[in-house]
Image (cartoon, rainbow, N blue to C red):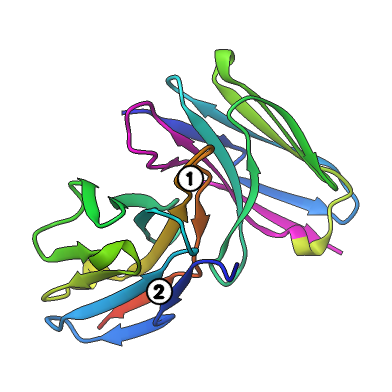
Amino acid sequence: GIQVEQSPPDLILQEGANSTLRCNFSDSVNNLQWFHQNPWGQLINLFYIPSGTKQNGRLSATTVATERYSLLYISSSQTTDSGVYFCAVEPPGGYNKLIFGAGTRLAVHP
Amino acid sequence: DTGVSQDPRHKITKRGQNVTFRCDPISEHNRLYWYRQTLGQGPEFLTYFQNEAQLEKSRLLSDRFSAERPKGSFSTLEIQRTEQGDSAMYLCASSARDGAYEQYFGPGTRLTVT
């Protein structure tokens, strides 16, 4: 089955710093989503981005489907950005089920 | 739009007991998914419903697990004869009928089997 790899696995930032999270996937995908999991376990939708670039405030994402990767950019990080960031892909013919990466654990210190 | 809701939020049970979780999807979402997440891992797909039909089940879903979605509205996930290895967060998600199939997740049910 399709493999989803996220890097880095862990990231520590000072408040105000910028960061880039990467998601590589091993096969073509129908869709791709980025999530932020807060300390209470809630998965919060960040981007639905099968291709192209989107921006939402301090966050932006780019997916290059032909090269099988996606990037999540966080600018001017805040302590509330702490948590785990997941990339999830939908393989073709998979009834829209999502295959998740292992996540990037981000800690932002004041 | 109240979002996906799950009940209970936490469940502690003794090994061998049966447990049942409920998921209410976003209204008018016809697709519903169950995932399981263990500590330090990403969620893993368990099963998928389109309306009331269960269309796919992961091999993770042993014969002790059963899921239903009567009338295509809320869904229940039952685990019989729980084992300590069943301890995990159980997440429900839903997506709309048409267009993009962006999935929205509920807050999860955290199960602890003692």
Q: Quadrant of residue B72?
A: bottom left
Q: Is residue A87 magenta?
A: yes
- The tally of labels here is 2
| Badge number at residue B70 | none
**Neighbourhood count class around disc 2 (C-alpha, 10 Å): few under 14, some 14–19, many 20 upward:** many
Residue B43 lies, with reference to residue B26, above or below; the image says above
Query: At 44% from the left edge and 57% from the top edge, which residue is drawn?
Result: B93
Q: Chain of mark 2?
A: B
Which segment is the magenta one? Answer: A81-110
Q: Is residue A8 magenta?
A: no
Q: CA distance from mark 2 to mark 1?
A: 20 Å
Quickly name the residue at label 2: B109
- Tell me the amino acid under the disc marked 1: Ala
Residue A25 or residue B58, whichever sits in front: B58
| Residue A54 in sight | yes
| Residue B57 in sight | no
Task: Give left or right: position of B112 versus A21.
Answer: left
Query: At 73% from the left edge and 51% from the top edge, which residue is drawn?
Result: A12
Residue A24 lies, with reference to residue B3, above or below; the image says above
Residue A92 lies, with reference to residue B79, above or below; the image says above
The picture places residue A18, in percent across and down from the top left corner, at: 84, 42
The picture places residue A25, in percent across and down from the top left corner, at: 48, 26
Is circle 2 on the same chain as circle 1? no
- Tell me the amino acid under the disc marked 2: Thr
Residue B70 or residue A66, whichever sits in front: B70
